[in-house]
Image (cartoon, rainbow, N blue to C red):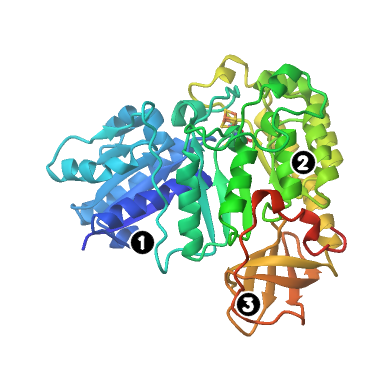
């Protein structure tokens, strides 16, 4: 049996693609191995979202090239954004590469490998499937499917954030049929998955191409002020309807998350879905990028700081205890000390419990290339350090405030010390000990210690280790209100 390994760079979206690559390869008889040294085929699944992507790829390919000298039959493939963006050029520069595969071409892997075997020049398959977008189903494989899974609902991006390479590497927005999404989630849950994270670059702009969902409660209403009020009222997103359909049709799904929502599609209807659906996690990762309206405009983010905060506050009013994490870019072209101070002020106002900060880097084919990258690198790093310091403090204070509370933890796996590790509804990592196997169960854990990035606790004595009881299916109109969940002190 030939052996393969996939080396993944970048985000969850790339990990999700790597999983699909693995499924296609196992479907044609490949066996997965961990180490490239044991493999006949190595796929490097690349990410080009931030700098040094090519440098990283180059050093990986160089290392594999040495292995190839010892093992001439070794096939090296490059997948993902770098292949999509620079396939031709990279193939010329790195002759060790045998093929290039764009994110929309994973299903073509068997025919590409056949071409490679026949000795063809490196096939470069990087065509977007614009006419008939294809979404590879995630397979629910016994022994591989854990309690959590990602499910793609859309691909590509129609936003044009001026710093971002994604519209170029992933193409325009294409949505998956709601029926397909629901069937995939049902299959995953039957195989033991208990938490699903819906994936999309602007996941909450989702619409069902088959038009099967109908309007969700609150669709077309807005209770916010808007710079672009007409745009908000015309929001055609059906994402809240999708969330309601998932919870109604797959009642054994214990938790539902999504990433990443664009703030301009965080509609009133989505807030009502959060209020009504107990499975929807009380945590939202909502990238803000900057706390300065001037910078947001230059980034073409299409919302103001006030609009962002308004959504945060509306969600907090309807969903007590909801927490937020975010992405921020520091040192965007023209970012002044005042602009950066505004970002710090926003962080102070929202108090994010999770924070992903990046220094701006120029990306090929992006509109921001026309702006001078004028913030010195040392200043960018200093700003990043400063905002990390602030948000680290916010996270630590938040975790500290959870001491003595009871959190419902979805158990994901065993930890290093033989204990268990899971996540709370708000995405905090929780470690605890238990005599039985509780992986995949939702267990109440009393928090006893708070660390920098995680919590430790003890199982509530009331918890009885038993098979998880099946939940009765709930009709959408009869869905319990979130407040029927145990109220967590300090939440
Ligand atoms: N689609 C998501 C959104 O709109 O927020 C995330 C896109 S991207 C995969 C993840 C993060 O990378 C972005 O939120 C942004 O903070 C960061 N990023 C993207 N382009 C960047 C650039 N040129 N320089 C620095 N950070 C960048
Ligand atoms: Fe990039 Fe903006 Fe699209 Fe996110 S929304 S993928 S940052 S263009």
Most extreme residue toward the top, as rendered?
Answer: 370
Give coordinates of residue 244: x percent, y percent: 63, 46
Residue count near mark 1 (Cα–Cα under 10 Å), binned few <14, some 14–19, many ≥20: few
Disc nearest the viewer among 1 and 3 = 3
The quarter of the picture where residue 405 lies is bottom right
Query: Between 412 and 444, which is closer to the camera in this rendering?
Result: 444
From the image, tell me which residue sits under label 3.
419
- Disc count in the image? 3
From the image, tell me which residue sits under label 1.
35
Apparent side of residue 236 relative to residue 460 in the rendered image (left or right): left
Q: Compared with residue 449, is residue 236 higher up or lower down, i.e. above or below?
A: above
Q: CA distance from mark 1 to mark 3?
A: 27 Å
CB within 8 Å, label 2 to label 1: no
Q: Quadrant of the N terminus?
A: bottom left
Specify whether residue 337 is in view: no
Q: Earlier in the sequence, mark 3 or mark 2?
A: 2
Apparent side of residue 220 relative to residue 436 in the rendered image (left or right): right
Q: Secondary structure at mark 2?
A: helix
Give coordinates of residue 331: x percent, y percent: 69, 29
Q: CA distance from mark 2 to mark 1?
A: 37 Å
Q: Secondary structure at mark 1?
A: loop
The quarter of the picture where residue 40 lies is bottom left
The quarter of the picture where residue 93 lies is top left
Disc nearest the viewer among 3 and 2 = 3
**Mark 2 CB near ligand 1 (8 Å cut):** no
Give coordinates of residue 458: x percent, y percent: 75, 77
**Residue displayed at 76% across by 19% down:** 229
Q: Secondary structure at mark 3?
A: loop
From the image, tell me which residue sits under label 2.
387
Give coordinates of residue 278: x percent, y percent: 71, 55
């Amino acid at each position: 049996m030939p052996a393969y390994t996939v080396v993944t760079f970048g985000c969850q979206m790339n990990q999700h693609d790597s999983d699909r690559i693995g499924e296609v390869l196992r479907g044609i008889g490949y066996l997965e191995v961990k180490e490239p040294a044991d493999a006949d085929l190595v796929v490097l699944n690349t990410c080009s979202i931030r700098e040094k992507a090519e440098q990283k790829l180059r050093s990986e390919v160089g290392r594999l090239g040495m292995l190839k000298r010892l093992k001439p039959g070794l096939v090296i493939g490059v997948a993902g954004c770098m292949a999509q963006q620079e396939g031709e050029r990279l193939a010329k520069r790195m002759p060790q590469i045998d093929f290039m595969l764009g994110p929309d071409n994973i299903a073509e892997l068997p025919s590409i490998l056949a071409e490679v075997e026949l000795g063809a020049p490196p096939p470069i398959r990087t065509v977007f499937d614009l006419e008939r977008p294809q979404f590879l189903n995630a397979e629910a494989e016994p022994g591989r499917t854990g309690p959590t899974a990602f499910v793609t609902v859309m691909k590509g991006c129609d936003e044009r954030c001026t710093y971002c390479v994604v519209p170029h590497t992933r193409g325009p927005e294409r949505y998956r049929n709601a029926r397909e999404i629901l069937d995939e989630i049902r299959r995953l849950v039957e195989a033991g998955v208990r938490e699903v994270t819906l994936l999309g670059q602007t996941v909450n702009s989702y619409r069902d191409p088959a038009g099967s969902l109908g309007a969700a409660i609150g669709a077309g209403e807005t209770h916010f002020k808007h710079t672009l009020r007409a745009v908000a009222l015309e929001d055609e997103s059906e994402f809240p309807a999708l969330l309601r359909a998932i919870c109604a049709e797959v009642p054994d799904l214990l938790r539902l998350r999504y990433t990443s929502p664009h703030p301009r599609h965080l509609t009133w209807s989505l807030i009502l879905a959060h209020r009504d659906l107990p499975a929807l996690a009380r945590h939202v990762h909502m990238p803000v990028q900057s706390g300065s309206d001037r910078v947001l405009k230059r980034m073409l983010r299409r919302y103001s700081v006030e609009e962002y905060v308004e959504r945060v506050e509306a969600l907090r009013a309807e969903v007590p205890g909801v927490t937020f994490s975010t992405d921020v870019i520091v040192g965007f072209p023209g970012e002044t000390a005042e602009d950066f101070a505004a970002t710090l002020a926003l962080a102070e106002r929202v108090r994010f419990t999770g924070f992903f900060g990046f220094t701006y880097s120029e990306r090929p084919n992006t509109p921001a290339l026309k702006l001078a990258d004028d913030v010195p690198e040392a200043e960018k790093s200093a700003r990043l350090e400063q905002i990390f310091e602030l948000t680290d403090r916010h996270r630590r204070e938040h975790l500290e405030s959870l001491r003595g509370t009871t959190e419902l933890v979805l158990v994901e796996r065993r930890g290093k010390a033989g204990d268990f590790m899971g996540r709370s509804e708000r995405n905090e990592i929780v470690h605890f000990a238990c005599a039985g196997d509780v992986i995949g169960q939702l267990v109440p854990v009393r928090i006893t210690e708070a660390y920098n990035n995680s919590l430790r606790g003890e199982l509530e004595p009331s918890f009885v280790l038993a098979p998880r009881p099946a939940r009765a299916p709930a009709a959408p109109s009869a869905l319990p209100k979130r407040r029927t969940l145990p109220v967590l002190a300090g939440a």
